[in-house]
Amino acid sequence: MTTKEKKRVQVQVDKDLAENTEAVLGKLGLNSTVVINALYSRISATGSLPFELKLSPREKANIDLAEATKDLPRKRITNKDELEAWLSDEEE
């Protein structure tokens, strides 16, 4: 049996994302190497990603809301009285 030559693949990943993902993988009895090898195998076999990359409805709604409100005037509210005044449309 011959041993296949290996290639090291290094990536930069957000620390919190990596730690959260590794915790999930650990509970599944997996590690990053196994999952990355499985991902690469599926990409190689199918010529595409094995999942669809798209925003969730909530992510899309957040982006749409941010876009729709980007030009609205903003005021920082720092206490209850300011909040109540803003909610009742009173001017200071």
Image (tube, helix red, strand yellow):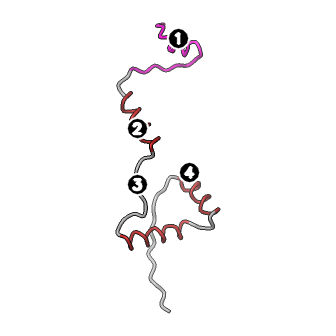
> What kind of element bears circle 1?
helix
The amino acid sitting under disc 1 is Ala
Q: Where is residue 43 in the image (x, y as percent from the top left)?
A: 39, 69
Q: Nearer the viewer, mark 1 or mark 3?
A: 3
Instruction: Classify 10 Å Cα crowding around label 3: few (below 14), some (14-19), many (20 and above).
Output: few
Task: Give the residue at x 34% y 69%.
Answer: 47
Q: Name the residue under label 3.
A: 53
Distance between the alpha carbons at the discs numbered 1 and 3: 43 Å
Instruction: Classify 10 Å Cα crowding around label 4: few (below 14), some (14-19), many (20 and above).
Output: few
- Nearest to N terminus: mark 4 or mark 1: 4
Q: Where is residue 14 in the image (x, y as percent from the top left)?
A: 50, 52
Q: Where is residue 7 in the image (x, y as percent from the top left)?
A: 44, 75
Distance between the alpha carbons at the discs numbered 4 and 3: 21 Å
The amino acid sitting under disc 3 is Leu
Quadrant in the rendering for residue 29: bottom right
Q: Is residue 37 above or below residue 83?
A: below
Q: Residue 63 carries which label?
A: 2
